[in-house]
Structures are given as structure tokens and as C-alpha cells.
Image: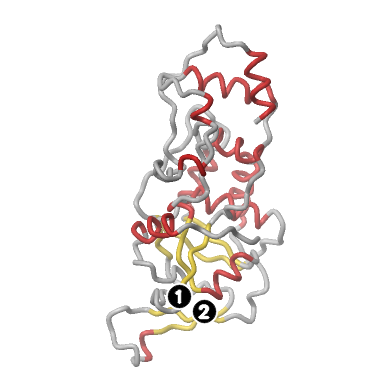
Amino acid sequence: MHQRSTSKKYIGRAREADPNNGRCLVENTSPNRGIQYCHVLPNTWTNPAILDSLELSWGMRKGSLKLDTRYNIFPVGVSLAHMYEKLQWILIPDNDIVQTYYDGRLCRTNIPEIKREHFVYRLFPVQKMCDVALIRQDSTTAPLFDSGMFTVHTFPFNTLPDLISHIHPKFAIMQAGYVLSKTNYSGLDATVGKQIMGIYQCWTTIYSTGYLENWLIDCIASERRVQWDAMTTSESESSDSEEDNEPCLSEKGSLKRNSRLDRRDLKRRLLSC
């Protein structure tokens, strides 16, 4: 799945947050050796119904989810970036992270919020990587001519070490669920695969107009009194002043019903968005 180009602003923010200082996440090679910044979940995802569902599932205000955010961007070698965009490999979060989101996937009032600076991932090859070898630089301090600095990892890459990144696991789980829904994921732990698919299906469920209407009522009636115009402001209008958002930060507050809201007008606005 091809991705739109990313602005230097978001690449800079991702580089600042990256614990690997801009080195390739998988092969740990220098930023001077053809690094590309990839979106975990492609920024070409534009289906408004799916984005609404993600915002609802992640406890976010309508219109607040941005895919051009440091938490969805990571550096990787150009060849690996090409294979990632071709859906040949995905990033799987730690089992405890997957378990946490799986346990909370159905509870809209108590959404798990996992706040960490860094997360642990492993690479899982999905397709067409049987003849690919990955050469990882094990040390960044020893002289480059020392052959012991590098280790060759072959399919299925179980010998790769843990991959540490700032990217948020919600994006990784979404992309993993999308890719696994289109392929045969034999080789992945059966429990983890089942849980990722269960999370993905819940997060992408298209809700009825009535359910979304109540969600919007909650948004409008929250203590923050967020106005509709602010909630639907486009990224192009707000990108210069707004910080990119972390998907685990919810704008909940104390939600109260407002019986004076005109439901017909609210439904009209919902259907036109």
C-alpha cells in the first residue's frame, strides 16, 4: 500500500522521539545509508467511517485522529521500506500489549491507555521474504571493518533481537490486522494472531447512525465544550499550530447528556461529514 509523502515537520518530530537516533529500526544501519521514514498505518487511509470507528474505539474526539504523527512514523532502510509498503512484513507488539487491548476491545467506557516512551516489537514476515536476508549492525561503536559487528538473519527472522521504537502499538496492531486479514498468517503464534484479528475487527466495526449520534452528543456535551467546527477542522488548517496527537490520549472528561440538543440537526451534520 503506497503512502503519501510526509512533511519534514513530522519526520523531524519522529526523529526526535526515536530511541535509535534515526537508525534503521530493523537493521540498525546509519541514517547516512538510505533511510526512509515510513508510516506504520499508511496515511492514505481516508475512509471516514473507519476513521470515525478508530476515534470512537480509542476514546478520541471526532476529527482528532491524525495519521501524520510521530507516533505513526519510523525510520527504516529503503529496501525494507519498499517491502513494508508491499505488505511483505509487519510489526507485532509485545504479547502483553496485544493482550491488554484484546481484553479491553469491547469496553468503550474503559479504554486501555498505555503510555510509554518506547515499545518492544518483533518483525513478522508475511509474504515473499523466503529469499531475503537481513544484515543487522550489532554495534554502533566498534570500527566498521570489524566483521563481528554484523549478523545475518534469514527467514523467518526469529533470530532478530527485540526492536525498540517510539511508535504507538495501536497503529501497529491496526496495520497488522489489516495485512493479516488479507493473507495466510501461518507462522505467527495462534493466540497472538487471533487476538490481533479480534482487536482489528472491533476497532474497524462500522457503527449505526444512532450509536455515532450518541457519541457526538457526548463529545458536544463534554466539560470541554468542544464545538463542532473545532472538531472537524482539517489537518491542513491546523497543522501549523497543533501538535501531533498520541492515539492513547483521550478527550473524555465528565460526559453528560444534553437533552436540549437538536437530534435532527445533529444527525444531519453526522450524515454530511
- Circle 1 SS class: loop
Which residue bears the numbered disc 1?
Answer: 27
Depth order, front residue of 158/264: 264
Q: Position of residue 50 (x, y in %)?
A: 64, 40
Which residue bears the numbered disc 2?
Answer: 134
Depth order, front residue of 46/89: 46
Left or right of residue 181, residue 115 in this image: left
For label 2, count other residues whose C-alpha is less than 10 Å away and answer few (under 14), some (14-19) or many (20+): some
Quadrant of the rendering where the C terminus is positioned: top right
For label 1, count other residues whose C-alpha is less than 10 Å away and answer few (under 14), some (14-19) or many (20+): many
Q: What residue appears at the point 51 percent right and 58 percent down from the top-left corner?
A: 6
Tell me which corner region of the image, top left, top right, bottom left or bottom right, holds residue 141: bottom left
Tell me which corner region of the image, top left, top right, bottom left or bottom right, holds residue 27: bottom left
| Residue 258 in the image: above or below residue 222 | above
Say whether disc 1 or disc 2 marks the residue closer to the N-terminus.
1
Cβ atoms at labels 1 and 2 below 8 Å apart: yes
